[in-house]
Amino acid sequence: MRFALAALLSHWRRKPLQLLTLVMGIALATALWSGVQAINAEARASYTRAASVLEQGALQQVVSKGGGGISIDTYGKLRRAGWNLSPVIEGTVRFGASWIKLVGIDPTTMPREGQVASITDGSDISSFFSAPGQLVVSAATARKLRNATDMRLKISENVPDDAAFVDISVADRLLDARGKINRLVVASEQRPGLDPIDQVAPETMLRENTDKPDVARLTDSFHLNLTAFGFLSFVVGLFIVYSATGLTFEQRRGTFRTLRSLGISLPALTTMLVVELAAFSLFSGIIGVILGYFIASALMPGVATTLKGLYGANVPGSLSIRPEWWVSGLAIALGGTAISSVRSLWRVWSLPILAAAQPRAWQRASAKTLAYQATAGGGLLLLSAVLAVTGSGIVIGFGVLGALLLGCALLLPGLLAISLASAERVSRTALTQWFWADTRLQLPGLSLALMALLLALSANIGVGTMVSSFRLTFLGWLDQRLAAELYVTAKDEDQATRLREWLPQHSTAVLPIWSVEGDVFGDQLQIFGVADDPTYRDHWPLIVADDNAWDEVASGKGALINEQMWRRGTAKPGQTIAMPGGWDATVVGIYSDYGNPKGQVIVGIDALVAHYPDVSKLRYGIRVPPESAPTLRQQLVSEFGLPETAIIDQISLKQQSRAVFEQTFAVTGALNVLTLAVAGFAMFSSLLTLSGIRLPQLAPVWAMGIRRRNLALYEVARTLALWLATFIAAIPVGLGLAWVLLAIVNVEAFGWRLPMTVFPLDWLWLGAVALVAAILSILVPVRRLATINPADLLRIFANER
Amino acid sequence: MTLSMTAVRKSYTTAEGVIEILNGIDLDVGASESVALTGESGSGKSTLLHLAGGLDHADGGSVIMQGQDLAKFGERERADYRRTQVGLVFQQFNLIPSLNVAANISFHAKLAGRYDAAWELDLTERLGLAPYLSRFPEQLSGGQQQRVAIARTLAARPPLILADEPTGNLDEATGDAVLELMLSLAKNAGSALLLVTHSMRLAHRLDRKVILRGGRIVE
């Protein structure tokens, strides 16, 4: 048995390049998939960690039904009824240049499961309570806050960055909460026989703990997006593995036959091959996981910025190595290799002992195979169309995408075969006829690489079109929406009051940016108030609006909702919304709200203040002639002692928004480039493999008087023709993909729909990049052909061959 | 004289050292003449054919075809020579797998600029290939493929036909018939024929026979 295995393995000594292709294929597929999974796992672990620490996520919570906070009286009522609860006051506060999420807790009543490890014993608690207060923060946050506060800083490993635990009375003071409690944490152990909470305090409601923190649910679509692109790269990588194993099994048919005729049983032979593949996949898997770690580490800072900018989620920009990640990476390598080689193994299993030893033309696909493949592709396209018309939900959206891409990829070889046969028919000379016919002969060997190229190119075109369409709409929207020349945030309510008195004399308009959070249709969302000012009527684009929408809003009867609420079917124009606090407003318009994953409602500023008198009044937009903005900025700093970071001008705000936007798609862009690189490698390995079995096809043409150099040029032209055909095919597929992303996936994932704009210049750029990849992929095989020793060609004609 | 080889030498370097394949060959083949080249395996028959066909270079001596010395040819001239002056028939057929029988037969003639539809039609009928013109090489038997390879060479009507065991894959009766046809068609086309065979019986049917042994012509 040992000798048989040695005979099998000797193949790789003679074909080191094939071995490299196989190893690289498995490693690349594993790397891209496990890299994306590592990013997702790190982010999700971070959400769970943050939720369990900051939000006491494992415990039930009592919140206000109206969204205005829980009063001390209500808290007292519940305590007196026997409920074991702990109050939390939380919000965001600025220390110097840093915004920190402050969580004010009462450690004496906080249940054990919700405690922060660093304030559990007596001395910790006394230090926590003593003036001027103590902030429990992470080491990174402590570095930021040094010299920005006179409070003591205590470092705790399990507090997320940019957050701080503080005594509830300190939080009340810093956040100017005036005794309003945000939530009550419910201890898991309660006395039996208590009256239900909604009976004791009908103004509150019990919020169940969920498996997933809010931010994890919000970011689901982002992670699904990453997973989809990781999967696409994985599939492209598996194409390489599939074609490499197929070829090596074909080339060893003679060895298999000999071993079987020498008494090696079929199960023993199959077992040896399985062991061989498993060993290779484990080895390649280790390389893949290491590569995946580097890919994930490179992408992680971008992902962290995106999550912070888009969802406000704090995720570390670095990656920790987890044992389960190694295990899942190696499992992916093994699983991927198994899927890619099952067909080849089945062929060995069903190979008659007297089968021809000569390898068949590699992966020769008959017209029948192409027809089956095209039928399957057509079926998938039909499925994609049916899903697009009848289905809903983001998973269905990705189903539409997957079926569209795979369907088109399966159709490609058949369409190319038809095109090449047509070109052959209209050829005038013997050489051009041979050129097209020979190209068709290469199609089966190249079809997997071409399918991979189609997937990568169409993904690039599709995602590129989506991002560019989004960029165009988003920038136009930003220009309209960020109309105020300066945006200022007061330090506290006293300063805000002084600003409200001072600003009207120094500007053309003051636009309050005030909001509360409240429960609308069962979701916690933001309710903004807008002043009755021409700025909004002139600059805020409304997607759908009543004729007098802004008048209705100003009167306090009408409300505007963002596109997300409308697209998700939460509310529609003309509908009456029951607002938190027991009042109603009618939807009179819909506005675009890109970059916000949540629902949002806008009402008139007077109505907002009337119904939510405790609303924080710290932020303002200020309209001044643009040339006066720098002077006003300086005045604000000198008059009010505002730090530079409390005033932001329109240009800087737009720059920040643009930076967040670009970062949001940087990761998918990087994955796109990696997928294209993998597809390029697939093309290279296929061409290299084919070049080894091309000699018998080319030698007769050389013998009849065509020079090696010309044969090499024909090989280049052949590759470029196939590349061009695939690129042309990728354009409609990519546009279809962009349409699905814009019209289905984005609407489901983010709640907004954008007009699709095409950017042909981008395609040309992509085409040029892909052309360079195609030329690089053909370089080695062509050079080998152009300089081949005639003796090698002569061997083709030798009788003893 | 169509082909004139004088003091031709050829050796190959292998792992065991330098092996002398041809060691001073003198051979002339006249227009329309058919010459059988026989000898044991490894005697250098195929190598001699490759040198005459411009597929390989001689180490010494000269190979003159219609007054032109092949040693002076660069790769471009050698390619032109193979395209226009020589027709090769190999034992392994070496058809072009991507082209059907009709396209295979006319391929060399078109490359050489000597395509003649009537002549090709006559050839295909006489070689019994008319029913198979739209088939591909892999759909033919070995004998049928060999007849296509012969038809391809004859269709191009080259001044010199070099055939390496052209009937080696055929049974005796078919081989005889195909050889007979080949000789007659070559004569009709005015082509010289240098044919490698192991069979003395076949060799006797050609105008002249040459025996190679140890890299030299012994008879």
Image (spheres, rainbow, N blue to C red):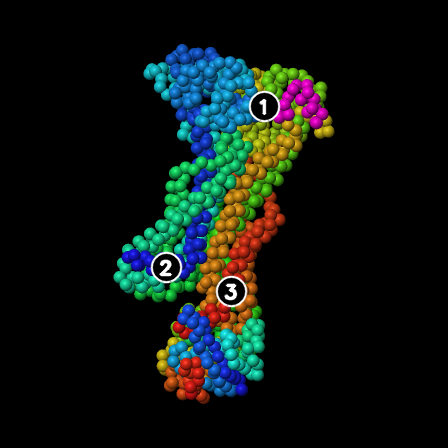
Q: Is residue B213 magenta?
A: no
Residue B90, given in percent of the width and then of the height, sits at 44, 75
Q: Which residue is mark 2?
A: A10
Alpha carbon separation for disc pair 2 and 3:
26 Å
Q: Which residue is mark 3?
A: A785
Residue B115, above or below A694: below
Q: Chain of mark 3?
A: A
Return the residue nearer the eye: B132 or A675: A675
Whether labels 2 and 3 belong to a single chain: the reply is: yes
Which mark identifies residue A96?
Answer: 1
Q: Secondary structure at mark 3?
A: helix
Distance between the alpha carbons at the discs numbered 1 and 3:
68 Å
Q: Is residue B70 above or below residue A139?
A: below
Q: Earlier in the sequence, mark 2 or mark 1?
A: 2
Residue A642 within the segment the image draws in magenta: yes
Q: Are marks 2 and 1 on the same chain?
A: yes
